[in-house]
Image (spheres, rainbow, N blue to C red):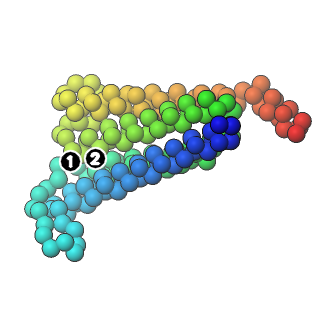
């Protein structure tokens, strides 16, 4: 597989995971809707369940928006992938890291509205909070490391000079 085919395959993977995250945001959005309505009901289905979804307005909104934002972030990563100053393996690793970051943050955010005291802000509390904490830990560390690595590779003078020199030759 040549470099161009490899980039296309990685881009399709990013698009697919981004779409799945946006779909997950839609599913979470139904939970948000049912929370707001205080019942589970969808028109034109004739029945409804009188059930108040757990959680808070802010928790549901955040979980819903995390899915949308992270799905779109993967699509943005797909768009800039060919411009990143990495080889094929490096681009694939960046893409995989972004997918892990996106999913960990979305899954951790979805735990908050569903389980009491599961915001994941600090270690301790119920098992669901500890799970959310570790997911956020992975996601946030990755969200700090990956962009720093990309910034370093893109902004260092040696990288710019080598790329500009290569462009002049062609």
Alpha-carbon neighbours of circle 1 within 10 Å: few (<14), some, or many (≥20)?
A: some
Q: Is residue 94 left or right of residue 44?
A: right
- The N terminus appears in which quarter of the rendering? top right
Asked whether 168 or 92 is in front, the reply is: 92
Q: Is the residue 117 above or below the residue 42 in the image?
A: above
Q: Is the residue 137 above or below the residue 112 in the image?
A: above
Alpha-carbon neighbours of circle 2 within 10 Å: few (<14), some, or many (≥20)?
A: some
Q: Is residue 118 left or right of residue 48?
A: right
Q: Residue furthest left?
A: 50
Q: Secondary structure at mark 1?
A: loop
Q: Is residue 170 visible?
A: yes
- Callout 1 touching callout 2 (CB < 8 Å): yes
Quarter-wise, where is residue 165 in the image?
top right
Question: What residue is at 54 percent from the left and 36 percent from the top?
Answer: 95
Please give the label number shown on residue 168. Answer: none
Question: What residue is at 33 percent from the left and 27 percent from the top?
Answer: 134
Q: Is residue 110 left or right of residue 39?
A: right
Residue 40: give x, y in percent of width and height.
Answer: 17, 62
Q: Secondary structure at mark 2?
A: helix
Asked whether 5 or 48 is in front, the reply is: 5
Residue 55: give x, y in percent of width and height.
Answer: 20, 47
Question: What residue is at 29 percent from the left and 27 percent from the top?
Answer: 122
- The C terminus appears in which quarter of the rendering? top right
Q: CA distance from mark 1 to mark 2?
A: 6 Å
Residue 70: give x, y in percent of width and height.
Answer: 45, 45
Q: Is residue 151 visible?
A: no
Residue indicated by mark 1 = 55
Q: Residue furthest right?
A: 169
Residue indicated by mark 2 = 59
């Amino acid at each position: 597989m040549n470099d161009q085919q490899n980039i296309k395959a990685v881009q399709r993977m990013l698009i697919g995971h981004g779409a799945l995250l946006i779909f997950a945001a839609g599913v979470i959005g139904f939970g948000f809707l049912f929370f707001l309505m205080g019942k589970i009901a969808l028109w034109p289905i004739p029945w409804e369940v009188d059930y108040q979804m757990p959680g808070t307005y802010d928790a549901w909104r955040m979980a819903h928006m995390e899915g949308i934002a992270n799905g779109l972030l993967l699509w943005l990563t797909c768009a800039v992938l060919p411009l990143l100053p990495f080889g094929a393996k490096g681009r694939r690793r960046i893409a995989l890291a972004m997918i892990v970051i996106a999913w960990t943050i979305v899954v951790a955010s979805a735990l908050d509205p569903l389980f009491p005291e599961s915001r994941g802000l600090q270690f301790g509390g119920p098992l669901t909070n500890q799970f959310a904490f570790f997911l956020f830990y992975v996601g946030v560390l990755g969200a700090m490391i990956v962009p720093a690595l990309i910034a370093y590779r893109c902004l260092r003078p040696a990288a710019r000079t080598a790329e500009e020199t290569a462009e002049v030759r062609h």
